[in-house]
Image: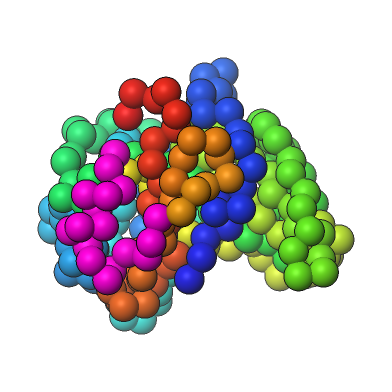
Amino acid sequence: MGCPAVAAGPCHHQPVTSRPFRLQAITIGDEPSAWAAAGFAVDGNRVTIGDTVIELAGADPTRGILRATVDGLGTDVDGLPLGGTSTPRPRPVVHPNRVVRLDHLVATSPDIERTATALVAAGLDDRRTRRFAASGRTRRQDFFWLGDVILELVGDDDQRGTGPAMLWGLALTCADLDAAARRLGDGLGPAKPAVQPGRRIATLRTRTLDISIPIALMSPHRGAAH
């Protein structure tokens, strides 16, 4: 299963510091054992990736991304569960799969204009909008910063659906994709060039691993010291 971040165009990789929004935690309806099998260092039901804690709530009854806790947002935004309160930054963790930070949190919307407008009204900066053709439709991506993580909002540019937006998947920065491939074997798809210049991307085979969301691993930004 692919991730919309695969198609993302180049975007600035320096975080905006003038806004007080930081992605602190993401709650996902998966079992810790599934993430351990994918090469993550698991501590109880928690996986720390950079400054973000993944809280694993178990596979029953609800799967997928259940909530993202964002410091500075007091409430959900257009159906996106993003509210939160300030917590200390976690200590760095070394993962066997060589993942070092969270690059993108991907959200989808049946009405991307509505959701983007709601995010701006909540105080987030819409840093960039990209439109591209796919399967006879015009797709759109809007990019917002949550601390040093990109919130990537994806949808059909001309669709005006009535349902809520939802959190969908992750793109993670991996210090060494080749080492990750050797460790994960058939659990990781082949690496290929990403749209961002100088980067490569590979998709975790999350269905095989019993992880409920799409996850892509990406090599670091060119010149980044991650």
Front residue of this view, candidates 153 and 165: 153
**Magenta span contains residue 177:** yes
Residue 9, given in percent of the width and then of the height, sits at 64, 42
Quarter of the image for residue 84 reads top left
Residue 198 lies left or right of residue 56; in this view the side is right
Where residue 117 appears, as percent x and y from the top left, is 76, 44
Above or below residue 124? Residue 191 is below
Left or right of 145, for residue 141: right
Q: Is residue 42 visible?
A: yes
Instruction: Please identify the residue farthest to the left as the structure is shown.
Output: 44
Residue 199, percent across and down? 46, 40
Image quarter where the C terminus lies is top left
Report the residue at 34% width, 23% height from top: 225
Q: Is residue 6 magenta?
A: no
- The number of numbered discs placed on residues in the rendered structure image is 0
Question: Going by the picture, which residue comes out furthest to the right?
Answer: 158
Query: How has the structure been colored for display?
Result: rainbow
Q: Which residues are magenta?
A: 175-191
Nearest the viewer among 4 and 221 is: 221
Vertical comparison of 183 with 71: above or below: below
Q: Residue at x 74, y 41 (%)?
A: 129
Relative placement, left or right, of 92 versus 207 is left
Q: What is the magenta segment's predominant secondary structure?
A: helix
Q: Residue at x 28, y 31 (%)?
A: 88
The image quadrant of residue 73 is top right
In percent of width and height, residue 133 lies at 78, 59
